[in-house]
Image (cartoon, rainbow, N blue to C red):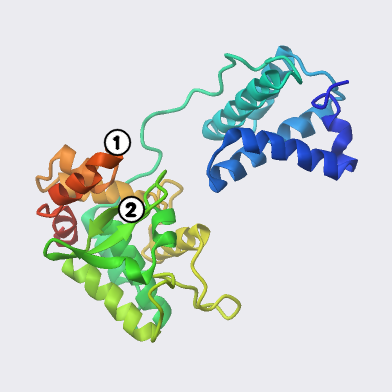
Amino acid sequence: MTLIERQPQAIAKQAELQAFYARFIAYLDAKESTVETYSKAMRPFFSYMADNGITRPTRETILAYRDSLKARLKPSTVQTYIITLRLFFAWAAQEGLYPNIAEHIKGAKLDRQHKKDALTSSQAKAILTGINRDTLQGKRDFAIMALMTSCGLRCIEVARAKIEDLRIAGDSAALYIQGKGRDEKTEYVKLAEPVEAAIRDYLKARGKAEGKEALFTSTSNNNAGQALSTRSISGIVKEAMRAAGLDSERLTAHSLRHTAATLNLLPGGSLQETQQQLRQTNIGPPRINANNLERAPKNSEARIAAA
């Protein structure tokens, strides 16, 4: 009996299970967040095998498992789970542990259209003006909303931001960020004057802080001063939307990214400039500095803030 076949029985053998995961994770050679996603995606398969008394999975097992996922999960989640299984069994075959029974099995068909709506300029303004800026929390939430709406930042980029990342690019204030898939903060977004003012107003109210501290921190009693998590940032955005009467499943923190793109394109911003602003272009390391210089004279963020 191979190690994979013993997995449903290995629940009581935590050391063996942990060693198994460690070997697979080492094979992945991925970022911590990716490893966490893959690890989470693996567990339901072993549970499925245990629930159905399967000790020797076959290709038919994978197909049936995929159908069970489709019946209760959204397509993007099904896709992640099946991709993980393909990686898992490719590794198992490579290690001589088990045949690659998941090879060429497809996940779920994804809708390539945006699943989140953008805000109109009036909706974005309503959200921002609806935030009470008399408190430290209100100043923070306003600064986060202004930053994400004008610069199209992802929640992870906001969570990673440090005070020392506030710098200068050309003749403008800028926030250097660690973009998706990046290991360093080699990219930046320019801060339109109202956005910089909002951030400075928050930091002034927050009081003395070191440059290496998180740009945005918690104000709760239990976590005061700690960096905000992506979940907290997403919740702040969602709550601000609800307070403005905008409560929809299609409106989330990621909607602010679509909003930034829309508000830049509508007044005349080019597609290329918008892609650069949202950091969607695949620019290799040798061209990073050239790209930053090219971005410096452009005014996407100011155009969005004005809108």
Instruction: Name the kind of residue labelled 1 in the image.
Output: Asn
In front: 234, or 15? 15
Split into 4 quadrants, where in the image is the N terminus?
top right
Q: Which residue is mark 1?
A: 282
The Cα atoms of the two marked residues, 2 and 1, are separated by 22 Å
Image position of 233 (left or right of 179): right
Image position of 19 (left or right of 110): right
Question: At 43% across and 70% down in the image, what residue appears?
Answer: 214
Instruction: Name the kind of residue labelled 2 in the image.
Output: Leu
Quarter of the image where one finds residue 104 = top right
In front: 109, or 199? 199
Looking at the picture, does residue 282 appear above or below residue 166?
above
Quarter of the image where one finds residue 30 = top right
Sequence-wise first label, 2 or 1: 2
Question: At 69% across and 15% down in the image, what residue appears?
Answer: 101
> Label 2 crowding class (10 Å Cα cut-off): few <14, some 14-19, many 20+?
many
| Residue 256, numbered circle | 2
Quarter of the image where one finds residue 169 = bottom left
Secondary element under disc 1, as helix, strand or loop, is loop
**Is residue 238 visible from the viewing direction of this image?**
no
The residue at the far front in this view is 286
Residue 269 percent across, percent down from the top left = 12, 45
Residue 282 percent across, percent down from the top left = 29, 36
